[in-house]
Image (tube, grey):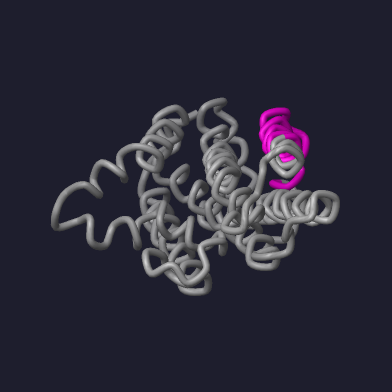
Amino acid sequence: MINVVNSELFKLRTTRTFLALFGIALAIVLVASICICAFVNFNGEDVSNEILGIVFGPIVRALALVIGILAVTNEFRHGTITPTLLVVPDRVRLMLSKLVAVLALALALGFVSGAIMVGSSAIFGELRDFDGSQYAGALLIGMTVGTALNAALGVGVGVLVRNQVGAIVGILIYGFILEDLIGLIPWVRDWLPKYGLGGVSNALSGVYGDDADFLSQPVAGLLLALYAAIVMAIGLVVMRRRDVTA
C-alpha cells in the first residue's frame, strides 16, 4: 500500500496540471490577501480573517475539488488506467491510494493557504492598527481540513463519474449555482443552506463564529467527512462493477 501511495504522490508532484493548480491557488491567496489587508479600510465590525476566509475559502476548496477529480479522471481520459490496473489489480486499493495521496497534497495546500491569510492579516494588522488575530486559529484549521475534505470529495466524484469534463463542470455548477437554486424551494430552504455542501464547507472555515445559520466547526467537519465518505464508498462499489477499457 505504501508503494502505491508513493507512486500516486509521484504522479501528482510531476504532473504540470496539479502543480499549476497548486501554484494558482497559492498565488491568488497571497496576492489578494496582501492587497486586501494593505488597502481595505477595516472598521470596528470588520474582521480581516473573516473577510479573507469568506472570499478565498471557496476558491481554494473549488481548486481542491478539481485536483481530486483530476487525480482519477486523468487516468481514464489518457488511457493510463489499464497499465495502472495491471500493476495494481485491486481497484479499491488503487483508488484508496489515490485518496491518501490527494489528501496529503490538499492538506499542504489548505495549510499554506490558511497560513498566508493569517500571516497577512497579522502583519498588516500590526502595521495598520487593526485586529489581525481574531479567528486566526479557526481559519487555519478550517482551511486545512476543509481543503482536504473537498479534495477527498473530488476523488469520490472522479471515481463515480469517469468523464473528466462532466465531473468537473457538474460539481462546480452544483456547488456555485444549483445548490443555491435548490435552496429556494420552500420545503428545502430551511435545511439545505445549513446542511448542504456549500453551507457545511463555509461553516468549516471557522470564520462565522456563533452564527445560528451555520453549524459549529467540528460538526461541519464531521458532516463534510461523511459526505466525502459516502460519495467515495458509492464510487468504489461502482468502480468494482464497471468494465475498464484501454
Q: Residue at 55% of width from left, 57% of height from top?
A: 149
Residue 114 is a magenta residue? no
Q: Which of 34 and 222 is in front in this view?
A: 34
Task: Give the residues drawn in magenta, as a range.
Answer: 8-31
Residue 128 position within the rendered picture, expressed as x and y whole percent measured from the top left: 80, 49
Residue 19 is a magenta residue? yes
Residue 143 position within the rendered picture, expressed as x and y whole percent measured from the top left: 63, 56
Q: Nearer the viewer, residue 126 or 246?
A: 126
How many numbered discs sit on the rendered protein? 0
Q: Residue at 72% of width from left, 37% of height from top?
A: 39
Q: Residue at 56% of width from left, 32% of height from top?
A: 74
Q: Is residue 32 left or right of residue 214?
A: right
Chief secondary structure of the magenta portion: helix
Residue 76 in sight in this render? yes
Q: In which quarter of the image is residue 99?
A: bottom right
Residue 21 position within the rendered picture, expressed as x and y whole percent measured from the top left: 66, 34
Residue 205 position within the rendered picture, expressed as x and y whole percent measured from the top left: 56, 59
Q: Nearer the viewer, residue 231 or 116?
A: 116
Q: Nearer the viewer, residue 131 or 239?
A: 131
Judge whether 189 appears above or below 133 on screen. above
The quadrant the N terminus occupies is: bottom right
Residue 101 in sight in this render? no
Q: Residue at 19% of width from left, 56% of height from top?
A: 188
Judge whether 154 appears above or below 191 on screen. above
